[in-house]
Amino acid sequence: MAVVATETQFRVLAVDDNLLDRKLIERLLKTSSYQVTTVDSGSKALQYLGLQDDQINSPSVSSDQHDINLVITDYCMPEMTGYDLLKKIKESSSLKDIPVVIMSSENMPSRINRCLEGGAEEFFLKPVQLSDMNRLKPHILRGKHKEQHQQQVLQNNNNTSRNNNSNKRKAMDDEISPKMTRPRFSSSLTVL
C-alpha cells in the first residue's frame, strides 16, 4: 500500500539567466520535494508573479494566482540583478511577505550584507548544494505564517465591520417607538 504525503508541497520560483545553473537549482529543489517554476530573468519573474514595472503596489494579477512560497534568484543577471528583483518584491504590498533567497558565485561580503539588509532571507554561494535546500523550509514556513496571520487580521476586520453593522441595526430597532409595534393578543379568548 502506498503512503500518500499529506504535507503541502511548497512552490518555488527559481530565477537564473544561466541554463546550467537553472537546471541544477531546479533538480535540487525537486529532489527536496518542492514544486519548481524556472524563469531566466528578473523581468520574467515579475511577470510570472503578476507584477509589472509600473505596478509596484497594485499587481495586475492576484498574487496568489501561482501561489509561490519562495523566490530563489541569481544575483548577477543582465537587465535586472537579483538585488533589483528583491527590492521590487519587497516594495510590493501583495508580494512583500514572499521570502527571497539570493545566490551568487562571488563571495563579496558587501554584496551579501546589502542583500540581507534589503530583505533577503538567505544568501547562498554557488554552486548551490542539496544541503542548502534544507535551509529553505523555515523561511517558507515563516512566510506562510505571515500570510495566514494577515488573512486572519482581514477576516477579523470583516467580522468587526459586520458586527458594527449588526449593532447599528439593533440600535435602530431599539429606537422604534412602541406605537409602531403590533398589539399582542391576550391569552384569554372571547367567545361570542
Image (cartoon, grey):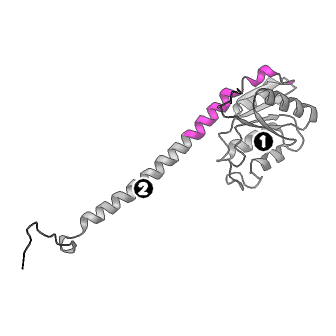
- Find residue 85 and name its label: 1
* Residue 188 x %, y %: 7, 68
Q: Amino acid at mark 1?
A: Leu
Q: Quadrant of the N terminus?
A: top right
- Residue 75 sits above or below residue 156 on the image: above
Q: Amino acid at mark 2?
A: Arg
Q: Residue furthest bottom?
A: 192
> Relative to the observer, which residue lies in front, 48 or 33?
33
Q: Secondary structure at mark 1?
A: helix
Residue shown at 34%/62% (left/top)?
169
Residue shown at 70%/34% (left/top)?
9
First-in-chain label (1 vs 2): 1
Residue matched to label 2: 162
* Residue 17 x %, y %: 90, 38
Residue range in magenta is: 126-148
Picture quadrant where residue 104 is located: top right
Check if residue 127 falls in the magenta segment: yes
- Residue 38 sits above or below residue 116 on the image: below
Q: Quadrant of the C terminus?
A: bottom left
Residue shown at 87%/23% (left/top)?
127
Picture quadrant where residue 37 is located: top right
Check if residue 65 falls in the magenta segment: no
- Find residue 16 and name its label: none
Q: CA distance from mark 1 to mark 2?
A: 39 Å
- On screen, residue 109 versus residue 182, left or right, reads right
* Residue 51 x %, y %: 74, 51
> Relative to the observer, which residue lies in front, 144 or 108?
144
